Amino acid sequence: MILDIVLQNRSYRRFLENKRLSYSELSELISIARFTPSAANLQNIRYFLIDSVPDCEAIFPHLKWASYLQYWNGPEQGERPVAYILVLAPTNTTKFHHIDTGIAAQTILLAAVDKGFGGCMLASIDKVAVHELFSLPSNLDIVLAIALGYPAEKVEIEDVTDPDDVEYWRDEDDCHHVPKRRLKDLIINRKG
């Protein structure tokens, strides 16, 4: 059921680094995402797949993790992502490329969960450094990075209790808690 997959699809930030993903597995995710809707059916989103240990180590310092957890600098050695997908868009594109990126990225993550692993979308990237690091084409901009691997953390969903406080947090057992707004707070013309 789609709800089960959505509930399992959390923003995982710690992974089993000794359990690798292959280029073929990443390619399968793109094969699924290519069927998603695209504004004017332009299909101008492109992908750069990263699966080797040296490339994963090279990109890691150029990413920012979990802005609400200011005391945390990201996953430690041994719990870092084992693959990444860079989502790219043409430098001269429509105003809808962010929507296309969101649809494709969410589809990629749902497909990852369906295959038994998970990931996290990252927008805080040193895009200039990563662009140079992988010699990406000059006519493509990095829109998003998707970190992937087999999750090594527990994530709990809970109701938002204070409408002004939606920050995720970690408890003393290092369980990651993610507050989500209640349905009654989201539908503005709710009946009953």
Image (spheres, grey):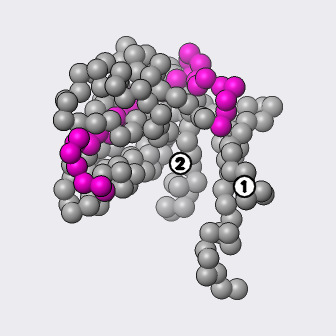
Front label number (2 vs 1): 1
- Please name the residue shown 23% across and 36% down the image: 140
Q: Earlier in the sequence, mark 2 or mark 1?
A: 2
- Please name the residue shown 30% across and 31% down the image: 49
Residue at the extreme bottom of the image, as rendered:
192
Instruction: Indicate left or right for 186 with 93 as reference.
Output: right
Q: Residue 65, located in which quarter of the rendered image?
A: top right
Residue stretch rendered in magenta on the structure: 68-96
**Is residue 120 covered in magenta?**
no
Q: Which residue is mark 2?
A: 9
Q: Which residue is mark 1?
A: 164
Magenta: main secondary structure equals loop
Q: Residue 167, located in which quarter of the rendered image?
A: top right
Between 37 and 129, which is closer to the camera in this rendering? 129
In which quadrant of the rendered image does the C terminus lie? bottom right
2 and 1 marks in contact (CB < 8 Å): no
Where residue 145 appears, x then y in whole percent?
A: 40, 35
Q: Give the residue type that dot 1 points to.
A: Asp
Circle 2 Cα neighbour tier, 10 Å, few/some/many (<14 / 14–19 / ≥20)? many
SS category of the residue bearing label 1 = loop
Figure check: 192 above or below 117: below
**Is residue 76 covered in magenta?**
yes
Figure check: 151 above or below 155: above
Between 114 and 130, which is closer to the camera in this rendering? 130
